[in-house]
Amino acid sequence: MATSSDDMKLTFRKYRDGDHEQRNWQSAIFEGDHSHKCPVYVHRTPPCQGSCPAGEDIRGWLQIVRGIEKPSGDMSWQEYAFRRATDANPFPSVMGRVCPAPCESGCNRNEVEDFVGINSVEQFIGDTALTEGFTYDPAPALSGKRVAIIGGGPGGMSAAYHLRRKGHASTIFDDHEELGGMMMYGIPEYRVPRPMLRGEMERITSLGDIELRLNTRVGKDVSVEDIEKEFDAVVWAVGCQTGRNLPVPGGDAPNCIAGVRFLSAFNTGRLKVLPTDKIVCVGGGDTSIDVVSVARRLGKIEADNPVDNPEDAIHGYVAHDSATAAVRTGADVTLTSLFTKEKMTATEHEVQDALREGVKILDGVIPIEVVLNDKGRAIGLKMAQCQFEGNAPKPVEGTEFVLEANLIITAIGQGGDLTGLEFMDNGRGFIDSDKFYQVPGKSGHFVIGDIIRPHLLTTAIGHGRIAADSIDYFLHQQEPIKRPRVDVHHFNLLNKLQETGLEPEAYSGEQVRGTSDARFAVHNFEDRSAQEIISHEKLFKGHFPYVARNLREEHGPSADEVIGHFEERMRSLTEEKAVEEAKRCMSCGMCFECDNCVIYCPQTAVFRVNKKESATGRYVDTDYNKCIGCHICAEVCPTGYIDMAMGD
């Protein structure tokens, strides 16, 4: 039914109340195209860095690889990228291979087509550094203080590295024959080539005044009291080297072992073959993938005698000659997971590699009971379909089935071994920490890594960096300062200006109004990187065309080729491909010199800085006498580097 004229309410009026003259529409449109706000160049942290547990300046070294940020002097860009990457993490070659890359999950490029291959470029940087023999700058003079680091894994090595760069000497105590912790004894060599790992560790110890006391267990071979007398501070980086037993009836059977023990036996050379053909691993994370992949590579042989039990081979009690090992065949290896494949915590490409290598994956299932024979040995694992009630997994009644198994390996979590160090135990097999990685109630004691809470290798590396800051304050008898909200390494414009000889002039102390022409200030730059992570909504994503990711070449074996295949699966990118992949970075929160703001400014108010005064972060400037606040520069900035804020 039509609306009557009496009920009709006009939504448009030619005049406002009090107006009596018709407006000029062209003027009205022009008035709407400017404001009192002018552009400010705002530096924010990209989500890749915000997601990096080691706190790397990822955008920074990608900018260097792609050629945007250039080194000063005669340093090569390869070495410059290495130095930027290792400012936070001294293991780029190793982490470029094995880190599950939360940085890539957070990458804003996922909103365009696919994440930037950060890991692959990091591996290129790390491998190039080892090939070219890049080293660190000489360490500063010693402070006279010495720190004991208990554990030579990624966290302990990171702490030693960052402490030495602050002038503090250290001694690393480790109960193994070599440094490296889980990098050395937990991850197979086909994932972490030992020459690369040893090279990165030797580069750290080459800084000097990092003493090693290997095959030494604190709490057994040396007392904590002696440590406290000899050193000015102590860092506990003992990691988690014990695995959890399967928490079901029969889970303590002799042929039910922990995944970390299995991998340690393999990585130390004690385990070369397995006298069993039916292996079940319970897990779903990266450790379980390593277990099943190693088991497929080892294959099985027929037991030489009845006492050749699979766990005996793992403990090193059984020896087989090379002729016997040569006739091994593929073992039947199954991985079970509470979660479906897409929700497993293992890295996706590692899961796909395991499937290609012939591992069977049963997902969404839960173990109920270990089936034992009359000798108390496991002969099977009773399973059921799994459903979650809240966060608690529960078996679905009526869905039970049994997997045959001669060896059951658990990779369902790890714990610490604090034997001899019981006074540090918080009652759960771990050590408590405050936000500065100090041990509460124990002055001079600090703790990092998995012994706080099991997580990633790169997390332990990040702990070492932050703990080194806290220890530095402690050794100088100062209280640690509040950590920034975004606690990672950031690009620093003042450092860059100093590096290129463009540092601001000294402030004369005179009171002035405005700094646009002053030489003592960067007048239109704001650094919010310690407080803000830039989201994709602030980017002009239409600037970025579809560009496929440059993938590393993989040559992993098939199920028929896997036995005895211990070559590295993933080859590094070539230099050309590494540069191409770095160019896919959208440089979120930092100018990457695309010229959009210069090209589209209708007033020619935005201009390129003189080449002699230009530096990363200072590529463009604004003439505020010309700027009308039309906001076009901010709209077309691909990286979200421009805010219309001046005048607020």
Image (tube, rainbow, N blue to C red):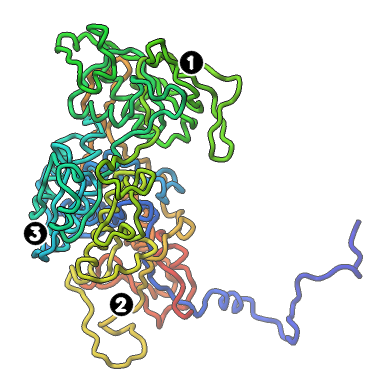
Where is residue 193? Give x, y as percent. Answer: 19, 34
**Quarter of the image holding residue 99?**
top left
Q: Nearer the viewer, mark 2 or mark 3?
A: 3
> Can the viewer see residue 376 in this picture?
yes
**How many neighbours does mark 1 have within 10 angstroms: few (below 14), some (14-19), or many (20 or more)?**
some
Distance, label 3 to label 1, CA atoms, is 61 Å
Residue that appears at 54% across and 74% down: 33
Residue toward you, 390 or 339: 390
Total labels drawn: 3
Residue toward you, 152 or 417: 417
Query: Seen in the image, is 12 located left or right of residue 323?
Result: right
Q: Which mark identifies residue 402?
A: 1
Say which residue label 2 marks. Answer: 522
Q: In this picture, is 198 found above or below 22?
A: above
Residue toward you, 163 or 202: 163
Q: Which mark identifies residue 175?
A: none
Q: In this picture, is 93 found above or below 193?
A: below
**How many neighbours does mark 3 have within 10 angstroms: few (below 14), some (14-19), or many (20 or more)?**
few
**SS under mark 3:** loop
Say which residue label 3 marks. Answer: 138
Outermost residue on the bottom side: it is 510
Where is residue 184? Give x, y as percent. Answer: 20, 36
Where is residue 284? Give x, y as percent. Answer: 41, 31
- Sequence order check, earlier mark of 3 and 1: 3
Distance, label 2 to label 1, CA atoms, is 70 Å
- Sequence order check, earlier mark of 2 and 3: 3
